[in-house]
Amino acid sequence: MAEAPTYEISFMLRKILVPFDGSSLSIKALNIAVDLARHYGSQLTIFYVKMPGEPEKVIELAKSIVGKKIPNVRYKTVELSENESISSLILRELSDESYDLIIVGAKGKSGTIESNIGSIPLALAVNATSSVLIIR
């Protein structure tokens, strides 16, 4: 059974979005999001953009990390089409669901060593209508 909250629900962090790809920094971002959701009573949405034909092992990884640590969590998978980008799908989810905070790793699975921040977190930081927490 999940631990009962010992706080009042925050109106500033009601809904948190975590774009998750299974990379080490997205795992770190998810752990921070779980901690915040537990502390503030937030609804946590783990958002995975799946490549066509790819198995959903990444969502299973997220479920194993979250476990029963928080009661209010949802897992959402969207398949990438050839006319869309990962960042555009995340931004659409953000506007459709009115999240208060996005927590994202600074680099994903395809991040290069030379860059300090990946293209997706950069696009989110520039274009998001809510706060973005970038995890290194």
Image (cartoon, rainbow, N blue to C red):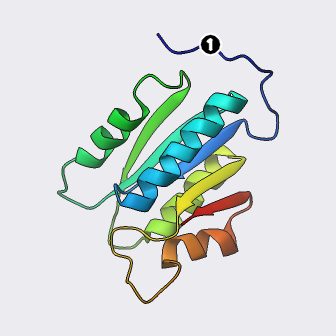
Question: Going by the image, does 87 lie left or right of 54?
Answer: right
In this rendering, the answer to whether 83 lies above or below 67 is: below
Is residue 88 placed above or below 66 in the rendered structure?
Answer: below
Q: Nearer the viewer, residue 90 or 106?
A: 106
In the image, residue 109 lies at what x, y percent?
33, 68
Q: Amino acid at mark 1?
A: Ala
Is residue 37 among the parts visible in the rendering? yes
122 and 135: which is toward the camera:
135
User: Looking at the image, which residue is at 48% across and 33% down?
Assistant: 74
The relative height of residue 26 versus residue 38 in the rendered view (above or below) is below
Viewer-proximal residue among 99 and 68: 68
Q: Is residue 95 left or right of residue 82?
A: right
| Residue 41 rendering spot, x and y as whole percentages | 68, 27
Q: Is residue 116 above or below residue 15?
A: below
Residue at 59% over, 54% down: 103
Question: Which x, y percent locates residue 58?
Answer: 29, 48
Is residue 19 shown to the viewer in this render?
A: no
Q: Mark 1, residues whose alpha carbon is within 10 Å: few (<14), some, or many (≥20)?
A: few
Residue 90 vs residue 84: left or right? right
Circle 1 sits in a helix, a strand or a loop, which is it?
Answer: loop
Q: Residue at x 56, y 15 (%)?
A: 3
User: Where residue 81 appears, x then y in whole percent?
Assistant: 33, 65
Q: Measuring 44% from the left and 67% from the top, which residue is drawn there?
A: 86
**From this viewpoint, which residue is outermost toward the top?**
1
Residue assigned mark 1: 4
Quadrant containing the C terminus is bottom right
